[in-house]
Image (cartoon, helix red, strand yellow):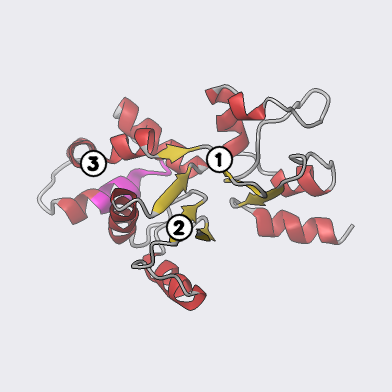
């Protein structure tokens, strides 16, 4: 199996497709699979096309979706039917693509629920993906914060601990500087990894 890994697309559908084409991804190749490390929307880009892309690839068993913090924001909006500043435009953009005649944000939320987005976020996502050599997650894994060290039971952490890990702003620092690493595995992170990765290389 050959995996194509991407993260933090934030609605940039065209850029995603261009990148996959350049990388040699072939949707008709049964040995090609996508791993998405989270943050699908919330930058007011092409949210509707991005949603269709993710939805169709899940349906065709071509995509593994690892939750990002913005995905959790959207999950909570749909669960609680209460909009927040991060997801306002995302909810409207996707719903408008599904039905252009909606009158309110509440109608938009209902449209997304009817289309199954909440079900996708609950049943077809995960906090991490693991292979023999790699652990892939959005920002970081749960760890022992009190002692600043690796927690061997991180895979079975609570929802609250995983929510914190998904939103961790210092994942690369924790891995590179503090040496919190999964034994015999390489951590692959999204989120703001390039920023912290560049910082840590300077020290």
Can I make out residue 183 in this image? Answer: yes
- Tell me if label 3 and label 2 are in contact, CB under 8 Å: no
User: Is residue 139 toward the left or the right of residue 145 in the image?
Assistant: left
Q: Earlier in the sequence, mark 3 or mark 2?
A: 2
Up/down of 190 relative to 141, above or below: below
C-alpha separation, residue under disc 2 versus residue under disc 1: 14 Å
Residue under numbered circle 2: 34
Q: Which x, y percent locates residue 199?
A: 79, 58
Q: Secondary structure at mark 2?
A: strand
* Magenta-highlighted residues: 84-94
Residue under numbered circle 3: 112
Q: Assign the C terminus to one quadrant of the image.
A: bottom right
**Most extreme residue toward the bottom, as rendered?**
22
**Count of all numbered marks drawn on residues in the image:** 3
C-alpha separation, residue under disc 1 versus residue under disc 3: 25 Å
Q: Which x, y percent locates residue 24?
A: 47, 75
**Most extreme residue toward the right, as rendered?**
203
- Tell me if label 2 and label 1 are in contact, CB under 8 Å: no
Q: Quick one: label 2, few (<14), some, or many (20+) residues within 10 Å?
A: many
C-alpha separation, residue under disc 3 versus residue under disc 2: 24 Å
């Amino acid at each position: 199996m050959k995996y194509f890994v991407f993260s933090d697309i934030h609605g940039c559908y065209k850029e995603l497709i261009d990148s996959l084409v350049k990388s040699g991804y072939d949707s008709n190749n049964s040995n090609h699979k996508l791993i998405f490390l989270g943050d699908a929307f919330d930058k007011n880009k092409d949210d509707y096309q991005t949603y269709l892309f993710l939805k169709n690839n899940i349906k065709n068993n071509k995509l593994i979706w690892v939750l990002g913090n913005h995905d959790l924001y959207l999950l909570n909006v749909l669960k609680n039917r209460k909009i927040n500043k991060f997801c306002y435009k995302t909810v409207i953009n996707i719903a408008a693509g599904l039905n252009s005649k909606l009158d309110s944000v509440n109608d938009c939320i209902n449209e997304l629920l009817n289309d199954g987005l909440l079900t996708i976020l609950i049943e077809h996502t995960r906090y991490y993906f693991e292979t023999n050599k790699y652990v892939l997650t959005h920002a970081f894994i749960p760890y022992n914060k009190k002692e600043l060290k690796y927690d061997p039971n991180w895979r079975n952490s609570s929802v609250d601990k995983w929510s914190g890990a998904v939103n961790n702003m210092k994942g690369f620092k924790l891995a590179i500087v503090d040496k919190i690493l999964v034994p015999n595995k390489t951590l692959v992170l999204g989120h703001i990894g390039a920023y912290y990765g560049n910082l840590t290389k300077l020290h």
